Image (cartoon, helix red, strand yellow):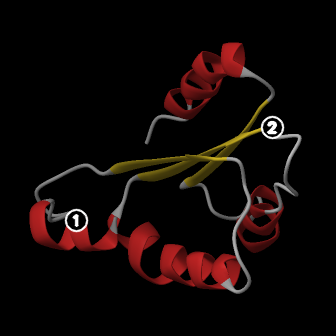
Amino acid sequence: CSNLIEKSFPPEQWNLYLFHFSDGDNWGEDNRKALQLLRESLLPRCNQFCYGQVESPYGSGEFIRSLEAAFGEQEEKVVLSEIADRDAIYDSIKQFLGKGR
């Protein structure tokens, strides 16, 4: 995402809204690296970062908890949504867009 922004979507010319959907499982140090990249590279260049985590019976789903711990309510650009099932995806997108930045 960072490379795509750098190559094709300069923030001074674009309003950037980033959407990331996942089951929340990462390998090893991935959460730490992802949070660092988000904090240092993506958030300074975007209007909003939206993360929707789909509930999965197969994994820990810890990434949303990592995002909450790192950004909580203090970072208004970060919007988090827990998605219980396929039917809840639409509501999650409405929640993201309702924050309007």
Inter-mark Cα distance, 2 to 1: 28 Å
The local secondary structure at tag 2 comes to loop
The local secondary structure at tag 1 comes to helix
User: Which one is nearer the viewer's eye here, 76 or 26?
Assistant: 26
* Tag 2–tag 1 contact (CB < 8 Å): no
Q: Quadrant of the N terminus?
A: bottom left
Disc nearer the start of the sequence (2/1): 1
Picture coordinates of residue 5, whole percent (x, y): 23, 65
Q: Quadrant of the C terminus?
A: top left
Identify the image quadrant of residue 73: bottom right
Establish if 99 lies above or below 73.
above
Identify the image quadrant of residue 31: bottom right
Residue at 58% of width from left, 76% of height from top? 34
Establish if 56 lies above or below 42.
above
User: Which one is nearer the viewer's eye here, 45 or 52?
Assistant: 52
Residue at 22% of width from left, 65% of height from top? 4
Q: Is residue 44 left or right of residue 78?
A: left
Badge 1: residue crowd in 10 Å (few <14, some 14–19, many ≥20): few
Picture coordinates of residue 54, whole percent (x, y): 72, 38
Residue at 63% of width from left, 27% of height from top? 92
Residue on which the image places disc 1: 4
Report the mark closest to the observer, 2 or 1. Answer: 2
Q: Which mark is residue 55?
A: 2
Q: Is residue 85 left or right of residue 93?
A: right
Amino acid at the residue labelled 1: Leu
Establish if 90 lies above or below 4.
above
Identify the image quadrant of residue 13: bottom left
Q: Which mark is residue 78?
A: none
Picture coordinates of residue 63, whole percent (x, y): 75, 62
Picture coordinates of residue 62, whole percent (x, y): 83, 62
Amino acid at the residue labelled 2: Glu
